[in-house]
Amino acid sequence: MKSDKRLGWLLVGVAIWNFFIWITFAKNLSAAHSRGEEHPQGYWIAHTVLIVVDLIIGAVLGVVGAKRLRAGR
C-alpha cells in the first residue's frame, strides 16, 4: 500500500502548509486591524470566515492524512 502512504504524506503536507499560510495571514490581518487600516466591516468578516474555514479544512486533511499513514503500516 505504498500509494496510501504517499497520499497520507501529501495530505499531511498540505495540512501543514495550510496552517502555516492561514496563521500567517491571520497575524497580518490582525496587525492591519491594530494599525487602524480602514476597510468596510464586510472585509474583516469575510477574511475571518476564510481563515476559520481553511483552518478547519487543514485540520480535516491532517486527520485523514494521519489515518492513511497509520493504515499504511
Image: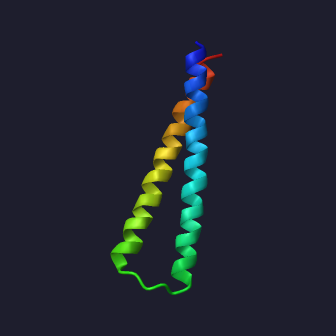
Measured along the vertical axis of the image, is residue 29 above or below residue 15? Answer: below
Q: Please tell me in which quadrant of the rendered image residue 1 appears.
A: top right
Measured along the vertical axis of the image, is residue 73 above or below residue 62? Answer: above
Looking at the picture, how far across and down is residue 2, in whole percent?
A: 60, 15
Quarter of the image for the C terminus: give it. Answer: top right
Looking at the picture, how far across and down is residue 18, in whole percent?
A: 55, 49
Measured along the vertical axis of the image, is residue 9 above or below residue 29? Answer: above
Question: 38 or 72, which is in the foreground?
Answer: 38
Q: Please tell me in which quadrant of the rendered image residue 13 appears.
A: top right
Looking at the picture, how far across and down is residue 21, in whole percent?
A: 57, 55
Structure colour scheme: rainbow
Residue at 56 percent across and 85 percent down: it is 35
Q: Please tell me in which quadrant of the rendered image residue 27 appears.
A: bottom right
Number of callouts in the render? 0
Name the residue furthest top: 1
Name the residue furthest right: 73
Measured along the vertical axis of the image, is residue 43 above or below residue 5? Answer: below
Residue at 51 percent across and 45 percent down: it is 58
Residue at 38 percent across and 73 percent down: it is 43
Residue at 50 percent across and 52 percent down: it is 55
